[in-house]
Amino acid sequence: MEAVLALSILSIIVVIGSGSLFANRRIQTELDSNVSVISDMLRRAQNNAITGEGFVAWGVHFDNGSEDFYQMFSGADWTDGTRHEQFTLASGLVFEVPTEGANAEILFDLRSGKRISATDNIIIRSSVKPDLKKTISVSGEGKVSSD
């Protein structure tokens, strides 16, 4: 009888632990996927600036509001520029940088492709597990990287 009780308790612990492990893996996969899409969008914006697409600078706007989104744009800034493709962060992910209620832009110079905006990194994290986060950085020379 004691052995059955011990096995039952052990089974419950294993089931709870594996559910948590699966949830963490799902969040990590979503985080990695979103970082990949954003990094790719930044590189495409930079490439458009280097090749002179539309004869204007290109960048990506990040908005931390009721619905966190990021959007490629062409022109001097997102407000007055031409807006292009837009994506929303996956459910369960939020921007840490820019902070809640704020926005940021990473803008690339026409022809040189260098970053000309003050913003040089974006941080995305899990809304459930704040320690799960990734930083996307853009150097002054325009190199896009993530940790």
Image (cartoon, rainbow, N blue to C red):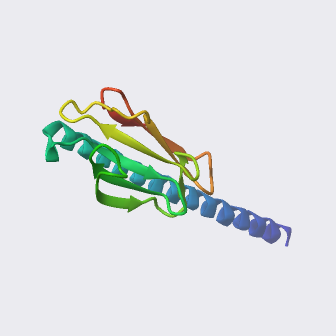
> Which residue appears at 35% of the width and 27% of the height?
140
- Residue 88 visible? The answer is yes
Q: Is residue 120 above or below residue 102?
A: above
As drawn, which residue projects farthest toward the right? 2
> Which residue appears at 43% of the width and 50% of the height?
62
Task: Name the spot of residue 11 as percent of width and height, x first.
Answer: 70, 66
Residue in the foreground of this view, choosing between 132 and 54: 54
Tell me if 62 is positioned left or right of 51 in this view. Answer: right
Residue in the foreground of this view, choosing between 96 and 4: 96
Task: Name the spot of residue 21 as percent of width and height, x first.
Answer: 59, 57
Task: Name the spot of residue 88 as percent of width and height, x first.
Answer: 43, 61
Tell me if 19 is positioned left or right of 6 in this view. Answer: left
Residue in the foreground of this view, choosing between 103 and 142: 103
Tell me if 69 is positioned left or right of 102 in this view. Answer: left
Q: Is residue 54 above or below residue 67?
A: above
> Which residue appears at 29% of the width and 37% of the height?
108
**Quadrant, the N terminus:** bottom right
Task: Name the spot of residue 105 as percent of width and height, x first.
Answer: 40, 44
- Residue 147 visible? The answer is no
Figure disc tally: 0
